[in-house]
Image (cartoon, rainbow, N blue to C red):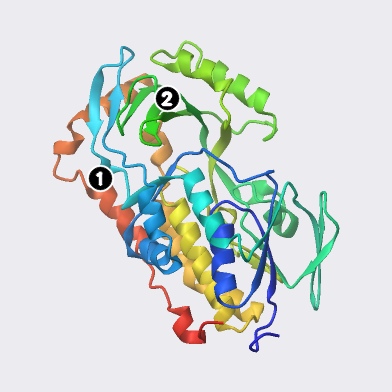
Amino acid sequence: MRNGMRNTNVLISGASVAGPALAYWLHRHGFTPTIVERAPALREGGYAVDFRGEAHLSVLRRMGILGDIERARTGMGSMSYVNAAGRTQATMPADLFAGDVEILRGDLGRILYDATKDYTEYVFGDSIASLTEDADGVTVTFERGAPRRFDLVIGADGLHSNTRRLTFGPEERFVKHLGLYCAIFTTANHLGLDHTGHAYRTAGRLVALYSARHNTQARAVFYFASPALDLNRRDVARQQAVLAESFAGNGWQSERLLHDMRQAPDFYFDSVGQVHMDTWTRGRVALVGDAAYCPSSLSGMGSGLALVGAYVLAGELAAARGDHRVAFARYEEEMREYATGCQKMGDGVAKLMVPGSRLLASFLNRYYKIMPYLPGKNMAAKMARKAAENITLRDYESLVGRA
């Protein structure tokens, strides 16, 4: 034990947002983190994520990376909804949908990796195969590497968490499909967008293009309504075929973007869902971020919630001097109401974003045209900020001292 701290050797599954953020705080409190990530390297690309409110910003500030994030921010302005001919039908000001700072997910991942790589062992291209717990720790076998022993295991491996499946059971028990699928990839900024985006909405479908990396490239985004599909999450060719079928004859830039999709270096495809669990911990295993309480990619709350969850989990472990039973219980107490509030922001968004009928799609396009001028135009942004700030973060370093 170091400084009376127990269970200091911690394995984290997942190197996206929650995993590296947790590694940062664990190391700062005197623990030794190891991160295993199925992907062969850091994932580039991805959609834009935002942080809003003092809870999010204070954690970034305490980590010393808020300045890095602000320097890499997207700087996005308004978003326009267009018709099939590309003519603007409605314009949504940035303050209606963005937080205090917005950054591409891949850029955020790189910043978190750079902040932790000097003291965190990263194992890329591997995944947990089994977990066997005993009174003293957890024996972990891997798909490729040799078995290892850890004191604690934390699943930070997203909506389709492997750690959750191994510890708590099949995914269908916990993941609520919201009736949508999403695809995103990098492409050329062929519309010459200047820190803005265009979106085209039809019944059950939405396709958008927005500028990225200071207008040198763009991100194409597709959403389509669908019941849960039986798709292999690693079969990219089949995913692209499903997307092409879903948007065949859709109009606007759909065909051009579907053609570009075939050459995209970072094609991402997934269902849109939420995770609901009665408990996020079992024995020496805990879940954090989307693996535990994914609010959905539509909520705008996922990355901030993951960041706060990592801060609280690591802090409670430090406050309990590594006693996982005490720390895990406190983690759930601190985070439960906050996570539930953030998840509510994702409820109902799917039907509004991708309406199921042509009539509703037409109505929403007209409504969005006048929305910036309505008295309650900022209501959604205010509700999102209230949910994001609905937690009082403990100052764990003042409680336990710096390790």
Disc 1 crowd rating (10 Å Cα; few below 14, some 14-19, many 20+) is few
Which quadrant of the figure contains the C terminus? bottom right
From the viewer's perspective, tell me whether residue 39 is left or right of residue 68: right
Residue 296 in view: no
Residue found at the very far front of the displayed protein: 118
Q: Which residue is denoted by mark 2 in the rendering? A: 207
The three-letter code of the residue at mark 1 reads Asp
Residue found at the very far right of the displayed protein: 146
Q: Residue at x 60, y 59 (%)?
A: 117
**Quarter of the figure with residue 327:** bottom right
Residue found at the very far bottom of the displayed protein: 4
Q: Residue at x 49, y 53 (%)?
A: 111
Disc 2 crowd rating (10 Å Cα; few below 14, some 14-19, many 20+) is many
Q: Residue at x 70, y 51 (%)?
A: 162
Compare residues 117 and 322 and report the one nearer the observer: 117
Q: Give coordinates of residue 379: x percent, y percent.
A: 24, 49
Q: Give coordinates of residue 233: x percent, y percent.
A: 67, 35
Does dot 2 land on a helix, a strand or a loop? strand
From the viewer's perspective, tell me whether residue 4 is left or right of residue 299: right
Which quadrant of the figure contains the N terminus? bottom right
Q: Give coordinates of residue 391: x percent, y percent.
A: 39, 69
Mark identifier at residue 173: none
Q: Residue at x 70, y 58 (%)?
A: 168
Does dot 1 land on a helix, a strand or a loop? helix
Q: Which residue is denoted by mark 1 in the rendering? A: 95
The three-letter code of the residue at mark 2 reads Val
Vertical order, 70 against 313 (above or below) = above
Compare residues 319 and 250 and report the one nearer the observer: 319
Vertical order, 298 against 123 (above or below) = above
Q: Which badge, 2 or 1, comes first in the chain's sequence?
A: 1
Q: Give coordinates of residue 317: x percent, y percent.
A: 59, 77
